[in-house]
Image (spheres, rainbow, N blue to C red):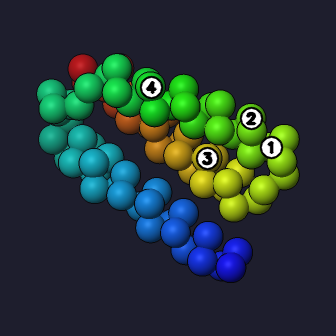
Amino acid sequence: MRKLGYIGVLIIQSSYVAQIYRILATRQVDGLSPAFILMVWGGLVLLQIYSLSIKDMVYIFSNFLGLLNTSLLLLLIYIWG
């Protein structure tokens, strides 16, 4: 079952790739809501704290990737926003 968890994590987190690629290609962030991305980032921080406390590696991995992806989106919004 753990393998299914990791596969699910990779599928979900890879959804960020298209958005990040579009921003890097166009240097436009007009359609993105900084408030939404910031709320997702904040939620992931809290989930990561929880995941670390229960020592669940699938969730730790998932939240780590999510934090990287949303941090990159926030950085791109800051640069080109």
Cα–Cα gap, marks 4 and 3: 14 Å
Q: Badge 4, how many Cα within 10 Å: few under 14, some, many 20+?
A: few
Rendering quarter of residue 42: top right
The quarter of the picture where the N terminus appears is bottom right
Q: Is residue 49 visible?
A: yes
| Residue labelled with disc 1 | 52
- In the displayed structure, 43 sits above or below 60; it is above
Q: Under tag 3, what secondary structure?
A: helix
| Residue labelled with disc 4 | 39
Q: Would you say 42 lies left or right of 12 here?
A: right
Please, what is the three-letter code of the amino acid marked with disc 4? Met
Residue at left offset 74%, top offset 35%: 49
| Residue labelled with disc 2 | 49
Rendering quarter of residue 47: top right
Image spot of residue 79 (x, y percent): 33, 22
The quarter of the picture where the C terminus appears is top left
Q: Under tag 4, what secondary structure?
A: helix
Please, what is the three-letter code of the amino acid marked with disc 2? Ile
Image spot of residue 7 (x, y percent): 55, 74
Cα–Cα gap, marks 4 and 1: 20 Å
- In the displayed structure, 21 sits above or below 3; it is above
Label pair 1/2, CB-CB below 8 angstroms: yes
Q: Is residue 75 visible?
A: no
Nearer-N-terminus badge (4/3): 4
